[in-house]
Every structure is written in structure tokens, then in C-alpha cells.
Image (tube, rainbow, N blue to C red):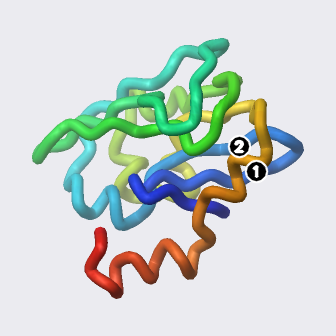
Amino acid sequence: MKYTQSHEWIEIKGGVGTVGVSDHAQEELGDIVYVELPTVGETVKAGEEAAVLESTKAAADVYAPVSGEIVEVNEQLQDNSSLVNSSPQDQGWIYKIKLSNESELEKLMDEAQYKSQFEQGKA
């Protein structure tokens, strides 16, 4: 699993990445009340907005950690957006993306690097 500085995670299997937000991100946002999912077939570039989370505190953009084509969205979130809170790195995934440039993964952080951001007070 790899992470972005903007708190998205991606897990790659067979050239397709599953994307969600980190546990830290969902804690900061509070209770998620709505998820605006991307459109299947849409192409996004790394760093572009791909989805939006709305919580009781604020709305937050979910950025694409890598470039590629959206190949699946988590339809469960339409009726149960709280999965982002209760299971952010399992059932609360947001979308799947077919990578167009696997070398972009090298720019992302591993879990230890990601967690060290918080220990240093950068997040």
C-alpha cells in the first residue's frame, strides 16, 4: 500500500489500483455523510480531483494518486457512506483505477514514511 501527502492510499493488484482515504483523513473529516464518486471510464491525472467526501465538518476532495482510467467505483458508498469512517482501508475504498504510468508509484510514500509525517507534525 502506498500513500499520498493528501492522505489517499492506493493498493495495486495486476495493474489496477484500489484507492481510498487514510484512517487519519477520515478521523480529521469526522462523520462522512455523502461520497461523490467518479465516473467509470473517466481518465484522471495524478494529483487531479477524482472524488469528493462530504462530512459533518467539511467537504474534501479525493485526489488521484496516479494517472489512469477509473474502472470501478464502490457503489456501496451511495447508501452507506459511513464505510469510509468504519473501514477506510478495506470496505470503505472509493474507486479502482487502471494505471497508465506505473512509475508514478515511485513518488508515493510507504506506510512508514506516511506515518512519520504526523510524528513530525507536518500533517
At x 54% / y 15%, what residue is drawn? 39
Residue 22 is situated, as x and y percent measured from the top left of the image, at 44, 60
Q: Quadrant of residue 11?
A: bottom right
Q: Is residue 11 above or below residue 19?
A: below
At x 55% / y 60%, what residue is drawn? 3
Badge 2 or badge 1: first in the primary sequence: 1
Nearer-the-camera pick, 79 or 13:
13
Q: Quadrant of the C terminus?
A: bottom left
Residue 117 is situated, as x and y percent measured from the top left of the image, at 39, 76
Q: Are marks 2 and 1 in contact (CB under 8 Å)?
A: yes
At x 49% / y 21%, what residue is drawn? 38
At label 1, the amino acid type is Ile
Nearer-the-camera pick, 21 or 105:
105
Q: Residue furthest left?
A: 57
Residue 6 is situated, as x and y percent measured from the top left of the image, at 39, 53
Q: Residue furthest bottom?
A: 119
- Quick check: 49 left or right of 93? left
Q: Is residue 2 above or below residue 60?
A: below
What whole-number distance in Å separates the C-alpha atoms at marks 2 and 1?
4 Å
At label 2, the amino acid type is Gly
Which disc is residue 17 wearing?
A: 2
Residue 13 is situated, as x and y percent measured from the top left of the image, at 82, 49
- Quick check: 28 left or right of 115? left
Q: Quadrant of the N terminus?
A: bottom right
The residue tagged 1 is 12
The local crowd at label 2, few if under 14, some if 14 to 19, many if 20 or more residues have their Cα within 10 Å, is many
Q: Which secondary structure, mark 1? A: strand
Q: Is residue 94 above or below residue 36?
A: below
The local crowd at label 1, few if under 14, some if 14 to 19, many if 20 or more residues have their Cα within 10 Å, is some
- Quick check: 83 left or right of 18? left
